Image: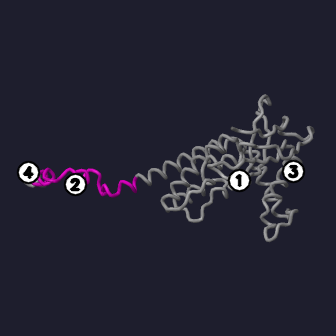
């Protein structure tokens, strides 16, 4: 057992140290130089936790439709589905895949819209357009209609070739395609776009306007979204009912 004198020497040794060293002793092996790294780690951990919570809520809605879409996509990709015959890209033709998915959902009793969002160029963002699928569902009591979006290239929208490991881990949590409510999609887009901006700045990469949350959201609820094509199942085979709605402009 250490003597009183030995204990006193230890105390005096600590007492004589500057405040910086005392802080170091209290915190263990960390130091002030490590603080930015710890802050960075906490940021990515919090973003991952937030994204996982949003995805958990998202999975509650549209589960039945999501499974159906997955089966349809697998069936379509097992065949020669491209009818536009784009050179060197017929196997991965998302345009034809999207049309086939919408048609097959209709054939299986879902009220389906094939929609296009269009927006004009501004000082902040370039103009563009984006196509996606909309399904009009109803609640279990059939008293309320629910608009569900299907984005077949969802995960691909957020891929960045030279992104950091933390961002790639975040994107790996995303589903390959999205089936769910617009508000859940918006929440996911905000989290991932903010993370993309941080990752690209850390890598000293240019953050283009097309990487920003406001631009990404225009793909599904643009300033001038228009109705592109409507397909509706017959009432005798309808498991999702209701009159399809036109996607209206969002200002």
Alpha carbons under labels 1 and 4: distance apart: 69 Å
Alpha carbons under labels 2 and 1: distance apart: 52 Å
Asked if marks 1 and 4 touch (Cβ < 8 Å), the reply is: no
Tell me if residue 154 comes above or below residue 136 in the rendering.
below
Residue linked to disc 4 = 4
- The answer to whether residue 235 is seen in the rendering is yes
Residue ID at (81%, 37%)? 245
Residue ID at (53%, 47%)? 49
Alpha carbons under labels 3 and 1: distance apart: 17 Å
Q: Quadrant of the C terminus?
A: top right
Looking at the image, tell me whether mark 4 or mark 2 is earlier in sequence order.
4
Q: Residue furthest front?
A: 123
Q: Please name which of the two marks, 1 or 4, marks the residue nearer to the observer.
A: 1
SS assignment for the magenta stretch, majority: helix
Q: Please name which of the two marks, 3 or 4, marks the residue nearer to the observer.
A: 3
Residue ID at (82%, 47%)? 114
Q: Please name which of the two marks, 4 or 2, marks the residue nearer to the observer.
A: 2
Name the foreground residue: 239 vs 18. 18
Alpha carbons under labels 3 and 4: distance apart: 86 Å
Alpha carbons under labels 2 and 3: distance apart: 69 Å
- The color scheme shown is one colour
Looking at the image, tell me whether mark 3 or mark 4 is earlier in sequence order.
4
Q: Secondary structure at mark 1?
A: loop
Query: Exactly how many numbered labels are in the figure?
Result: 4
The answer to if 246 sits in the magenta stretch is no
């Amino acid at each position: 057992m250490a003597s009183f004198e030995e204990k006193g020497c230890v105390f005096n040794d600590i007492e004589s140290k500057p405040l910086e060293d005392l802080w170091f002793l209290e915190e263990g092996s960390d130091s002030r130089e490590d603080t930015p790294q710890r802050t960075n780690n906490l940021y990515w951990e919090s973003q991952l936790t937030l994204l996982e919570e949003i995805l958990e809520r998202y999975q509650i809605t549209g589960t039945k439709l999501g499974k159906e879409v997955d089966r349809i996509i697998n069936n379509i990709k097992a065949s020669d589905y491209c009818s536009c015959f784009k050179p060197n890209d017929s196997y991965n033709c998302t345009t034809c895949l999207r049309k086939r998915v919408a048609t097959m959902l209709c054939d299986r009793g879902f009220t389906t819209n094939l929609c296009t969002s269009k927006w004009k160029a501004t000082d902040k963002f370039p103009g563009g357009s984006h196509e996606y699928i909309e399904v009009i569902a109803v609640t279990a009591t059939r008293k309320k209609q629910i608009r569900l979006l299907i984005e077949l290239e969802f995960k691909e929208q957020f891929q960045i070739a030279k992104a950091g490991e933390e961002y790639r881990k975040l994107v790996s949590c995303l589903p390959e395609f999205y089936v769910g409510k617009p508000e859940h999609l918006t929440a996911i887009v905000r989290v991932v776009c903010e993370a993309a901006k941080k990752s690209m700045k850390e890598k000293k990469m240019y953050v283009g306007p097309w990487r920003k949350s406001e631009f990404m959201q225009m793909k599904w609820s643009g300033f001038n979204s228009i109705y592109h094509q409507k397909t509706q199942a017959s009432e005798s085979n309808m498991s999702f009912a209701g009159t399809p709605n036109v996607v209206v402009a969002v200002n």
